[in-house]
Image (spheres, helix red, strand yellow):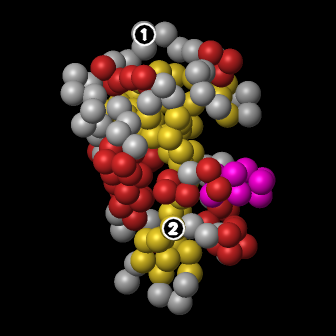
Amino acid sequence: MTTIRRFCCNDLLRFASVNLDHLTETFNMSFYMTYLARWPDYFHVAEAPGNRIMGYIMGKVEGQGESWHGHVTAVTVAPEYRRQQLAKKLMNLLEEISDKIDKAYFVDLFVRASNTPAIKMYEKLGYVVYRRVLRYYSGEEDGLDMRKALSRDVEKKSMIPLKRPVTPDELEYD
């Protein structure tokens, strides 16, 4: 049985194997600690029996006015636990926190333009491509900024795609 719980400091020493996927962005330890300290409600881990980490989601809430939104910084599932709807459960949890607790207008995320399986999964979850960000990943690969409107965005304005691509320096948030 899978347990989904808040991420804790000890998990930082146990989740490296989940990050081995070449499509998963990895960060330095202080980056993870900052998220854990500032946005603990947005950082969860899925654990298998025997305390084996299956995957995690890390995010934050940011913006102002109608740009107030939840952001998925990373969601990843270890290869041996994929195709079990685990990423969907983690995404739903972050969306619910963004919607019900923080009253955000939408949730957004960035994904490599070449990561077709992830893009298809996000589309099944109701996300649309809002804009393309040129050379977003290491100055080489384009990223797609995908969004899903939450209940506060009744008219779904946050999901209306931009007509042109942007560069990383045009992004509003870190």
Residue at the spot 68% in from the left edge and 69% down from the top edge: 9
Which residue is identified by label 2?
Answer: 6
Q: Main secondary structure of the magenta part?
A: helix
Q: Give the x, y percent position of residue 37.
A: 65, 56
Quarter of the C terminus within the rendering: top right
On the picture, is 170 further left or further right than 27?
Answer: left
User: Does residue 107 appear in the picture of this structure?
Assistant: yes
- The disc, 1 or 2, on the residue closer to the chain's N-terminal end is 2
Q: Give the x, y percent position of residue 50.
A: 53, 89
Residue 32 part of the magenta segment: yes
Q: Residue furthest left?
A: 154
Magenta span? 28-36
Label 2 element class: strand
Which residue is identified by label 1?
Answer: 163
Q: Residue furthest bottom?
A: 50
Residue at the spot 71% in from the left edge and 29% down from the top edge: 140
